[in-house]
Image (tube, rainbow, N blue to C red):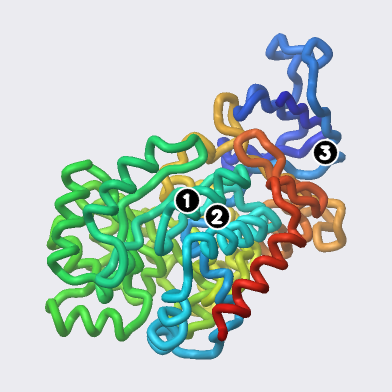
């Protein structure tokens, strides 16, 4: 496909937060031109046979959001077990229901999540769940970009299986990649953790996990190993090649220094953390230390909304409240976390900005909505006032998957909704 976007505002994210007026061309799955005047590059749009020419009408093209921590298959638990503490929610509600899942269920539930990501301008997610195969199938069938991460613990998967997944899914499809990882220190025995560290060092690969999400998690690790989760895992050689942590709320100065030393990423999940009363991550301090920060929604069981606009607002709002400083966590920094920071955490350096040669993972933000007027500062308005209603289009890998409320994922939404309702009702019996 050759698609020309013209009469556009364009936020490339390659030059800070500068917005230019011009056009952007997509040929195949890559960006072939972005700028103010194609003729200056000796390019003429009338010499190209376009499949589509889209008048952007002054709306904004920008890189898609990277949802850097998800559990897509958990859409079936949305609003199923709300208003419970984290460990009670996890052990008494989530795990028993998950035991009833099969691969077909996870496929359908992942598709539902992908649809929601598209409505929120998300062009890639970093997904951890019970089995990678149905997630891979759902992503490929929908045309969506997914980075998988190992979900191993004492109850599911093995180090040997994870190694197979690592070798398989990093060569499987252009939309799919795989990172080493495990659920958490508190669900994974030391022997398995040592094997994961050995595997990471063998492949010179980063490792990702839930880290310091609750105070009780940290206290449990201190009691068992005499160290915080970050320090303990680091002592095993887990992070010699980097990686990252999801949540990272109850972090010590030593923990943050370890993240900085190993160029690790912190993926914050404020919606989930607020709902589960887990706490507020010290993001301002982490940013001042130079730690890469990204944003994830977490799963639809704990959030329950897979909405990057809500997450962005919570990131900045909670930091201001926690520090009693209205200037804390600038809106532009948050927008960078949701795009560039997520891309770095996920290893997606080929679709982080809108530049020639980059993969065409692009969203269009509708500025012709009441919440976007008047136009003073577009980038900050996205963070402070933007919502899913402003996502006019979501393109992944050069293909428009969502446009003006219509999905192009090879599946009629009504049919998927019907299957999901039937599955969930049977699971509750």
Q: Is residue 325 visible?
A: no
Q: Is residue 35 above or below residue 381?
A: above
Disc 2 is placed on an element classified as helix
Q: Can you give x and y, in whole percent of width and height, for residue 122 in the image?
A: 61, 52
Q: For residue 30, what is the image quadrant? A: top right
Q: Is residue 26 above or below residue 415?
A: above
Mark 2 neighbour density, 10 Å: few (under 14) some (14–19) many (20 or more): many
Marks 2/3: CA distance? 23 Å
Mark 3 neighbour density, 10 Å: few (under 14) some (14–19) many (20 or more): many
Q: Decide: marks 2, 3 in contact (CB < 8 A)? A: no
Q: Mark 1 — residue?
A: 341
Q: Is residue 63 above or below residue 152?
A: above
Q: In the shown orientation, is residue 163 left or right of residue 63?
A: left
Q: Is residue 2 visible?
A: yes
Of 354 and 159, the residue lying toward us: 159
Q: Mark 2 — residue?
A: 338
Q: Can you give x and y, in whole percent of width and height, for residue 130 in the image?
A: 40, 64
Screen quadrant of the C terminus: bottom right
Q: For residue 169, what is the image quadrant? A: top left
Of 263 and 288, the residue lying toward us: 263
Q: In the shown orientation, is residue 207 left or right of residue 40?
A: left
Q: Mark 3 — residue?
A: 56
Q: Decide: marks 2, 1 in contact (CB < 8 A)? A: yes
Q: Can you give x and y, in whole percent of width and height, for residue 107 in the image?
A: 54, 58
Q: How many marks?
A: 3
Q: For residue 376, what is the image quadrant? A: bottom right
Disc 1 is placed on an element classified as helix
Disc 3 is placed on an element classified as loop
On residue 11, the disc is: none
The residue under the point 29% across, 46% down is 164
């Amino acid at each position: 496909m050759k698609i020309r976007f013209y009469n556009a505002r364009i936020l490339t994210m390659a030059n800070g937060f500068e917005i230019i007026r011009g056009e952007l061309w997509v040929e195949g799955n890559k960006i072939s031109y972005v700028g103010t005047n194609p003729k200056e590059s000796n390019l003429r749009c009338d010499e190209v046979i376009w499949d589509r020419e889209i008048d952007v009408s002054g709306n904004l093209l920008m890189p898609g959001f990277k949802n850097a921590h998800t559990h897509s298959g958990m859409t079936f638990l949305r609003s199923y077990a709300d208003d419970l503490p984290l460990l009670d929610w996890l052990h008494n509600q989530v795990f028993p229901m998950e035991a009833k899942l099969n691969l077909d269920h996870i496929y359908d539930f992942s598709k539902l999540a992908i649809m929601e990501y598209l409505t929120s301008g998300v062009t890639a997610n970093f997904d951890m769940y019970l089995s990678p195969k149905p997630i891979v199938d759902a992503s490929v069938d929908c045309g969506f970009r997914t980075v998988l991460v190992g979900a191993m613990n004492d109850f599911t998967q093995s180090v040997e299986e994870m190694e197979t997944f690592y070798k398989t899914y990093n060569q499987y499809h252009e939309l799919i990649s795989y990172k080493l990882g495990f659920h958490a220190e508190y669900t994974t025995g030391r022997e398995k953790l040592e094997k994961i560290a050995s595997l990471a060092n063998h492949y010179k690969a980063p490792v990702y996990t839930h880290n310091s999400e609750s105070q009780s998690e940290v206290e449990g690790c201190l009691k068992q190993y005499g160290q915080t989760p970050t320090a303990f895992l680091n002592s095993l050689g887990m992070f010699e090649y980097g990686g990252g942590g999801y949540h990272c709320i109850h972090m010590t100065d030593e923990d943050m220094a370890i993240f900085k030393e190993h160029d690790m990423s912190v993926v914050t999940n404020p919606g989930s953390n607020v709902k589960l009363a887990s706490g507020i991550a010290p993001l301002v301090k982490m940013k001042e230390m130079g730690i890469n920060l990204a944003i994830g929604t977490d799963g639809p069981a704990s959030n329950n909304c897979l909405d990057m606009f809500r997450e962005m607002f919570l990131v900045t709002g909670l930091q201001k409240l926690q520090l009693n400083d209205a200037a804390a966590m600038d809106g532009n920094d948050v927008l960078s976390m949701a795009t560039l920071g997520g891309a770095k955490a996920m290893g997606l350096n080929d679709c982080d900005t809108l530049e020639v040669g980059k993969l065409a993972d692009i969203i269009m933000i509708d500025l012709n909505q009441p919440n976007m007027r008047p136009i003073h500062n577009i980038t900050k308005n996205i963070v402070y006032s933007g919502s899913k209603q402003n996502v006019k289009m979501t393109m992944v890998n050069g293909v428009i998957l969502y446009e003006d409320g219509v999905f192009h994922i090879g599946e009629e939404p009504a049919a998927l909704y019907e299957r999901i309702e039937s599955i969930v009702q049977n699971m509750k019996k």
